[in-house]
Structures are given as C-alpha cells and as structure tokens.
Amino acid sequence: MDSRVTKLPSESEVIVIGGGIFGCSIAYHLAKKGKETILLEKRNICSGASGRNGGQVIQLEGREKEPANIKKRLALTRENNIILKTLSRELKIDLEYRRTGSLDIAFTKEEWKELEYVVKIQEKAGDREIALLTKEETLRLCPLLTQEIKGARYRPSDGTINPFFYTRGLAENFVKHKGEIFTWTEVKKILRKNGKVCGIETTTGQRIRAEKVVNVTNAWSSFLIPEIDILPLRQTAVVTEPAAPLPVCPVEAFIKGEAIYANIQSERGNLIAGGLDSFRLSRQRQYEERIFLEEVRGNAKIFSCLYPSLKDLSIIRAWAGTMALGPDFAPVVGKVPESEGLYMAAGFYNGMAYAAIVGELMSEMIISDRTPSLLECFDPAKYYRRKFVWPKTYNCTSLAEFFARK
C-alpha cells in the first residue's frame, strides 16, 4: 500500500497521524461510523513497530505486582480478545489469529517463588483464568522445552496474530469506507490556536485543516506532543527457517538475567525470538533500526536455551524496531489537555493485545467527545507537563528494573 501522493486535501473532519496498527484501527472505526477521515504516515503502512514485533497477543505481559494496574490492563485486553474472535470475518482477511496460550517460564527457584506470588496477586485482582503450572505440567503442554525449567505461569486464551495482515486488513477496510491514506507524508507539527486544534503541517510545508487530530505515532508521539513524555524502547528479534508444526506458544522468560520473548511460530513454520543481549542505548539511539552481530548471536541463543532440539535451526533474518512505554509502563490514551480536539494513543509495549478495542473506543470518544470508562485510567492528563528522569542508557530489562524501583 504505497501512496506517494503530494497533493493532499486542504481539510478533513479528522486527521489520524501514524499508519501502524493503532492508527489504522482508529481510522477504520471512524470511517465505518461515517466520519470523514484521512490517515498520514511518514513511511509506509506497518513500517514501524507494528511490522517489527512478534505478533504475540498476551493479555498481561510482564510480572505486574500492582492489583490496580492488573485490573485496568485486563479490562481492556479481555475486550480486545473478544473482538479478535470475529475480526477476520469482519475484515474479510485471514489474520492468522490463533489462541495457542502463553507461558511465562521460571528457570530458578527464586523465579518460581516470584511466579507463585504474581499469580496470587492476579487472582486477588479478579483474574480467574491465570494458572500456575508445575514443571511436569508445563512439559506436557510443551515437551520441546528444556528440562531445566521449574514451571510456568499459563494463560490459555493468549495467542498470536500476523501483524502485517492485521494492519493491512484494517487499512484496506478503512479505504473501503471512503477513508484516504497518504503514505510518505511526514507531519512536522500539529497546529493549535487558542486552546484548540486547527490542523497539521507536513515537513514539506503543506497544511491540512481539521478540528480533530489523533496522534498515534507511539514512540514518536512526544515529537508532536512534547507536553507528554513517551519513552522509546528499541527491541531486536530474529526469525528462523521454516520448521514443521511444533507444540509451541508465545513464551516470556528471563535468560541470563535478560527479559526475552520467543516461539511465535508463523503459519509458514518460522519461529521468532528476541530480547537476549539487546544493547543498552541512550534515548536518542533507541530509534536506530540497524542491528548488530552480537545481538543476532544473542537472540539466536534463545532457541537453544529454551528448546535444545531446535538449536540447529538457521537464522534467516534479524531486525530492530522501536516500541514505546508510557511513564507508568502503561499506555497513554485519550484527550490531550489544553488542546480541544487533540487525542493520542501511545506507550503500547504489546500493541496486538490492545489495538482492536482501542480503535473502537477511541472512535467513540472522538465522535461523542466523551471518554469511555475503560479508558479513564489511561488519561493523558495524568502525565501532562510532568518531567521524568529516565536512565541515561537502557534496554527492556533495565527499564523493568527501573520501574520496579519507582
């Protein structure tokens, strides 16, 4: 979907900035409800984080220990899972959505105790699905796993989706509902006057008038709305040659003290993993998309650490992409203060678990100008003009440790 158009419309009811999964989801729902909407993307559709992730649909990734955060995140991701059940039929495209379950693996006795504690907190927070599996139960579920594990946390309704088909399906259906997409069109600034949005200006100086603008650029959000600090986070990954269908599912774990994700097997048999030996970089360098040999080697080791029998699979591709985090390791979604008509959705570390429901709810908010109850706890006003002191260099693991200390 390459639309290198320089002739832009002079105005639109709504402008959505960002052609990733969230931008396409919000734009699709707006157009479906009859709202005149255009979408602007500085590169191509699904060229950023949406096309550089493993496609995991994990409803509560990480080892969250705050009950309030567990409740608010699960409230959204559960609704997202409900939508995903029928979304392929609605979009008329196979999104390769599969409910395989997911595992959070413990390799040490200390980790096992931590998982016991985390599961108890989740259960107290109302999570009736999460389960704690012994080593034997985990190996029966996934016999390829190393015998070194101690057990796992398991959620059966998690799974995987093809992020390219997902994003493209939303984009194509947005166009079917009379929406317009302009790729290779970078927004330089959001135009505001007297406390209201009045449009955007591109890097080529072209202006488009609009009373409502939605910033859905995730890790780049703060360049357009500097009053809210969204932290970029570079992640790396590798993909293997195709393998026969395997009894695998998305996995979270710590290997050598590093947070990793692994084992999303595509329909074509390829396996994906990432996170091990990712460099700690400055904030500015978190946007780098080149990948280094040391990172490729580190990510390749994930397979032999988790699945000894797969250690000889060849790595055929590697990549880096920039994800994002909100100030509380949670997304920031809603109306931007002091700027009537300006909205944002950013800080999604695990976007596939949120995009469908956020697109639906954001479209409702933009049309009605009322905040849906499920989004109230992610209100951008909580972080508006607040200053945060982040580590000078970081990766996913060190950030998790940083947030745990806050």
Image (cartoon, rainbow, N blue to C red):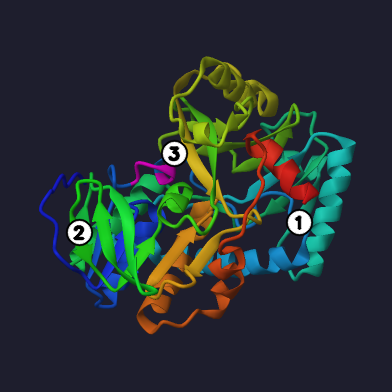
Residue under circle 2?
A: 207
3D distance between C-alphas at marks 1 and 2: 53 Å
Q: Does 268 appear above or below 19?
A: above
Look at 65% across and 43% down and name the residue there. Answer: 390
For label 1, the crowd category at 10 Å Cα-Cα, with few meaning under 14, some 14 to 19 and many 20 or more, is some
Instruction: Pick whichever, 387 or 87, lies toward us.
Output: 387
Q: Is residue 187 left or right of residue 324?
A: left
- Upstream in sequence: badge 2 or badge 3: 3
Residue 188 lies, in percent from the top left, at 31, 50
CA neighbours of label 2 inside 10 A, class few (<14), some (14 to 19), many (20+):
many
Q: Magenta span covers which residues?
A: 46-50
Q: Say which amino acid is labelled 2.
A: Arg
Q: Give percent across and percent down for residue 213.
A: 33, 66
Mark toward the viewer: 2 or 3: 2
Helix, strand, or loop for circle 2?
Answer: strand
The CA span between labels 1 and 3 is 29 Å
The residue at the point 44 percent across, 43 percent down is: 49
